[in-house]
Image (cartoon, rainbow, N blue to C red):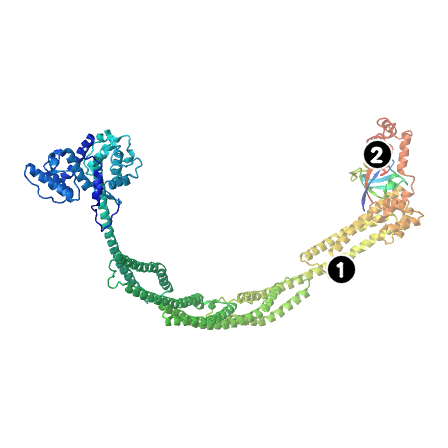
Amino acid sequence: MMMTQVETTVHYDNGYEYEYMNQEDDWDRDMLLDPAWELQQRKTFTAWCNSHLRKAGTQIENIEEDFRNGLKLMLLLEVISGERLPKPDRGKMRFHKIANVNKALEYITSKGVKLVSIGAEEIVDGNVKMTLGMIWTIILRFAIQDISVEETSAKEGLLLWCQRKTAPYRNVNVQNFHVSWKDGLAFCALIHRHRPDLLDYSKLNKDDPLGNLNLAFDIAEKHLDIPKMLDAEDIINTPKPDERAIMTYVSCFYHAFAGAEQAETAANRICKVLGVNQENEKMMEEYERLASELLEWIRRTTPWLENRTPEKTMAEMQRKLEDFRDYRRQHKPPKVQEKCQLEINFNTLQTKLRISNRPAFMPSEGKMVSDIASAWQGLDQAEKGYEEWLLTEIHRLERLDHLAEKFRQKATNHENWASGKELILSLNDYETATLIEIKALLRKHEAFESDLAAHQDRVEQIAAIAQELNELDYHDVAAVNQRCQSICDLWDKLGTLTQKRREALERTEKLLETIDQLFIEFAKRLAPFNNWMEGAMEDLQDMFIVHTIEEVQSLIAAHEQFKATLPEADAERQALLGIHNEVQKISQSYGIKANIVNPYSTLTTEDLIDKWDKVKKLVPQRDGALQEEMARQHANERLRRQFAAQANLIGPWIQTRMEEIGRCSLEIGGTLEDQMTQLKQSEHVIVAYKPNVDKLEGDHQLIQESLVFDNKHTNYTMEHIRVGWELLLTTIARTINEIETQILTRDAKGISQQQMKEFRSSFNHFDRKKNGAMETDDFRACLISMGYDLGEVEFARIMILVDPNGTGNVSFQSFIDFMTRETADTDTAEQVVASFRILATDKPYILVEELRRELPPEQAEYCIMRMPPYAGSGAPPGALDYTAFSTALYGESDL
Amino acid sequence: MSSYSVTLLGPAPWGFRLQGGKDFNLPLTISRLTDGGKAAKGGIGIGDMVLSIDGIATEGMNHLEAQNKIKSCSGNLSLKLQK
């Protein structure tokens, strides 16, 4: 659809007249009208006329009849043109009718239509062809003529319009106003193109022309206010439908859509113009609004930037800085954008207005570009100032914070150091301290004093910082001052306490030193004194063993000497106690609560007193003991003397008797019997003397019971006497026995008295030691003197014989035995063996019956019982070994 | 007075004279040695005391018992003696 310009109206010039006339050439004026076409035209034109006449509230039924009086014709024209025709004649006469029709025709002509051969009479007469032709002329002139599409008008224009509108529909090809419309798709396409909501074109089929046509006609009538003007069956059945009818119906579509389009275009145009207006207005409003907002924002923001209220803390200040940065980074940029946008908008608006010939935009008062610019400048300045102020403040606060922190740290450190010091300094620990502890405390205190001194300038520093904070007007300076004050107060207090403590410690030290000295002296003197006491105690309790009166006497003397030293000792004791008392006095009067113990001495005064008492007690005890002893010693002495007297008698008496006996036994003259008699006599005397010995034993027992072991009054001990007595008894018995044996031997061996004397003489001679027995060497010498030439072996054999017990002594009896043996015959054992051999008739064994035969029964049985069986060969059972038996008799067997 | 043991290889005679016994109240001693005899060769000395014969102590033995004990040793004779 061609967009016509806003300001132009539809022009058409009379040039169309010619073209229109050309169109008339298409139809045969000579009344050659196809009957089908006539029919179609009738239907269509009637419908067309009625579509207009309905607006006047009337209709025609019969096209050739109803227009005959011209009234409806004039009405039709009025409706179509919208203009008033001259008043119709109301008469019913023919000439009235003709006049009316002429009015109509004149009107048509006045519209530039050249009516050729259409007269009023023919119309009044109801000439169908003329009437149809006239209606066609009207249709052409009023419905089609004005159609202009892309500078193509009327019929071509209408055709072009159809073509343009149906171009998108591939199955529609409008080339003419007859056969192109037969399948109904063109109508449908036209409808669909403008009102797709009215039918679903995709569902249409060109093989259903009837359906398509009827559909299109129905929809057009229902929705487009285009009454049905064509008959679907007529169109289908006619090979070439009537062009004019089709054109008439199609023109209605054109007017329906194109009209709407025009209206739309017009409305658009208006809207566009209005829109531009509105746009501009909007832009102006927008500008105003943005400008207001921006200025408002600047107005709000500026005080904030001009605010110089200082903050208390760095953190708060930094937050302010942060806020400022946020402002710069986040809040301002959009505003900068806004300002920019505002400027752009302003310029754009102005340009637009200028282009569209509108007056320039004048912002309201205070919202001018210059206003905004100056306000913005103010903002920038405020910003700068604010930033500077922020940084300055931050620095200041930084410094303050730093100082405050320094203060806090130092104060805390100091407080930590000082905490508890007051308490320590107030301790009374020195009251219960020993000297060493006091010294330690003093040293500790010295250390503390130097520590205190070291802290002096620290305290001063703290105060200095507090001062500066005050000067710099720190926000929390009150707390600082309070803390500083308490630190200083405590400091002073510490100083005082330190001094007081020093004095107390020193004083206590002195006292303890004095005491210490006393203790030392005490210890120094107590030790030796204690030793003396212990020695004294020992001595006084000393168990003495004395054996003589003299010894006791010297002990007593010593004791007396000791007693003489007691007064001196007592004095020392008192001195020691005195020292102790002094210590007590000092500690009491100076309130020293410590447990005063003498560290130099393990001994206490109690020990001292204790021991002294003991010593005192022991002295008289010893006196007593010594006296007792003295008495005892005297008693012992008596016993000794008694014993001695007795022993001195008995001893010699025994000796005398022994000598007597010895002499007797050595006596050569006189018979053995004489000797015997003498000896018996002696024996008798001796036995009678026993009571004396017994008495001595008694005395000895007493002495022993008194534990007396020595006796200077006699050389004889009880043992001596006892032994001597025993010896005497045994000697006498032995000697008697010897004599008896000698008698026996003499008798047995037939030794004569003379022989005996000789033996005796020899024996006595070789008995060098004269003790009644010969020693080995004596015996050897004796044998040699008798002519025995003895080897060692033989001598040894002989020695065994004479001294079988190996005593080393040969008795007189043995000597005699030996001598007599040697002078005897051959081995007695051999003799006995020889005798048995004779009885055994030279056999090495003897039989039982032989023994019984040869020996007396008793001796025979004795032999039978004792003889061992003969173990040699060739002996009958029961043979007895007489050789073994014989040798056994003499205790000698050769094996 | 040391004791020693000696084993003489049999058979008898051993070449010594035995003297003593409980019945004589004398210790059993060697009173004589045959020169070159087995006892002399075995190192036995005159005067040596016989403590045991064939392992059996001679204490309490009379002469005949001792004699028989020695005689009953067939083969070797073991003696314990004291010098």
Q: Residues within 10 Å of mark 2 (few under 14, many from 20)?
A: few
Whether residue A570 is situated above or below residue A97 in the rendered picture = below
The residue closer to the viewer here, A175 or A687, is: A175
Residue B75: which disc? 2
Q: Secondary structure at mark 1?
A: loop
> In the visual, does A695 lie left or right of A407?
right
The residue closer to the viewer here, A129 or A580, is: A129
One can see residue A303 in this view: no
> In the visual, does A817 lie left or right of A632?
right
> In the visual, does A137 lie left or right of A496?
left
Residue at 72% across / 58% down in the picture? A643
Which quadrant does the N terminus of chain A fall into?
Answer: top left
Mark 1 belongs to chain: A
Instruction: Name the amino acid, label 2.
Output: Gly
The quadrant in which residue A17 appears is top left
Q: CA distance from mark 1 to mark 2?
A: 67 Å
Residue A144: which disc? none
The residue closer to the viewer here, A4 or A633, is: A4
Whether residue A116 is situated above or below residue A588 in the rendered picture = above
The quadrant in which residue A820 appears is top right
The furthest residue to the right: A787
Which quadrant does the C terminus of chain A fall into?
Answer: top right
Q: Secondary structure at mark 2?
A: loop
Image x and y of residue A27, in percent: 21, 35
Instruction: Name the amino acid, label 1.
Output: Asn
Residue of label 1: A715
Mark 2 belongs to chain: B
